[in-house]
């Protein structure tokens, strides 16, 4: 991956599109782009193999905004993150493929999950602090997406689209688990950091 990133960065610098001083910025940008593209490609292959392409697209429509603004578990290595992301995606699709639940039960569960996500926010990245202004912006954006998700879910209930409703509910469940694990990891890291500081004092 790093070799591809270096090649792409060298190319745009040689073409005069960017300055050598901006190398690190573009290397990071290319890395994020390639990692995201690989994760998306593998997920779409999984969805195609399960014959659930539309469900796979719906998962990303619901999950990506939630993950972006609510936060969640951040792993230290990309490979671990890739495996966990694909596993989460696969589990959600398999739940939809295998299980059947009453629409009203799913709606009640969804309401509990959406409220839990809102109450558990924020789950910050321990490696990147967020100021008050950013946190206010993220919370505002999260609220908009939660309202939009609620409208979509109500539409699924009215139209009796139980499979799509199950997918959205399962996606929210995975998101809530990610947020809880993220909170736990952040707390563990902070406790470990405080212990190290106390040792030196």
Image (tube, rainbow, N blue to C red):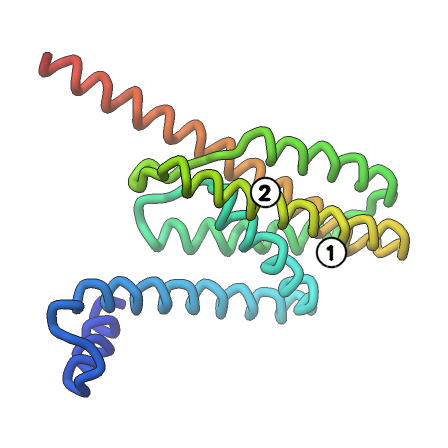
Depicted 56 relative to depicted 108: above or below: below
Q: Is residue 8 left or right of residue 135?
A: left
Depicted 72 relative to depicted 93: above or below: above
Q: Nearer the viewer, residue 51 or 7?
A: 7
The reply to whether callout 1 and callout 2 are in contact (CB within 8 Å) is no
Residue 20: quadrant of the picture: bottom left
Q: Is residue 166 left or right of residue 20?
A: right
Which percent across, then down, holds residue 50?
Answer: 66, 65
Q: Residue at x 51, y 31 (%)?
A: 180
Which percent across, then down, holds residue 195?
Answer: 22, 16
Query: Which residue is outermost to the bottom?
Result: 15
Q: Quadrant of the N terminus?
A: bottom left
Give the mark nearer the N terminus: 1 vs 2: 1
Q: Residue at x 82, y 47 (%)?
A: 100
Depicted 107 relative to depicted 31: above or below: above
Query: Which residue is outermost to the left?
Result: 200
Q: Residue at x 24, y 71 (%)?
A: 5
Which percent across, then down, holds residue 68?
Answer: 49, 50
Q: Kindly state the secondary structure of the residue where label 2 is placed.
A: helix
Q: What crowding class fits label 2: few (fewer than 14 Cα within 10 Å), some (14-19), or many (20 or more)? A: some
Which percent across, then down, holds residue 69?
Answer: 50, 46
Q: Which residue is mark 2?
A: 174
Q: Quadrant of the C terminus?
A: top left
Name the mark on residue 112. none
Q: Kindly state the secondary structure of the residue where label 1 is placed.
A: helix
Q: Nearer the viewer, residue 6 or 98?
A: 6
Q: Which residue is mark 1?
A: 97
Q: How many marks?
A: 2
Q: Is residue 76 left or right of residue 90?
A: left
Q: Residue at x 69, y 46 (%)?
A: 147
Residue 57: quadrant of the picture: bottom right
Q: Is residue 98 left or right of residue 174?
A: right
């Amino acid at each position: 991956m790093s070799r591809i990133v270096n090649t792409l960065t060298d190319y745009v610098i040689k073409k005069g599109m960017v300055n050598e001083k901006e190398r690190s910025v573009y290397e990071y940008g290319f890395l994020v782009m390639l990692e995201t593209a690989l994760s998306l490609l593998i997920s779409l292959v999984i969805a195609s193999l399960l014959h659930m392409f539309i469900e796979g697209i719906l998962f990303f429509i619901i999950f990506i905004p939630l993950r972006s603004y609510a936060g969640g578990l951040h792993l230290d290595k990309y490979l671990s993150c890739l495996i966990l992301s694909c596993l989460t995606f696969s589990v959600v699709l398999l739940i939809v493929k295998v299980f059947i639940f009453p629409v009203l039960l799913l709606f009640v569960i969804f309401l509990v999950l959406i409220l839990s996500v809102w109450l558990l926010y924020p789950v910050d990245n321990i490696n990147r602090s967020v100021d008050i202004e950013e946190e206010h912006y993220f919370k505002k954006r999260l609220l908009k997406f939660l309202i939009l998700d609620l409208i979509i879910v109500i539409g699924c209930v009215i139209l009796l689209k139980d499979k799509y409703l199950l997918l959205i509910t399962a996606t929210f469940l995975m998101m809530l688990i990610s947020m809880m694990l993220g909170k736990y990891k952040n707390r563990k890291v902070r406790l470990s950091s405080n212990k190290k500081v106390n040792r030196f004092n």
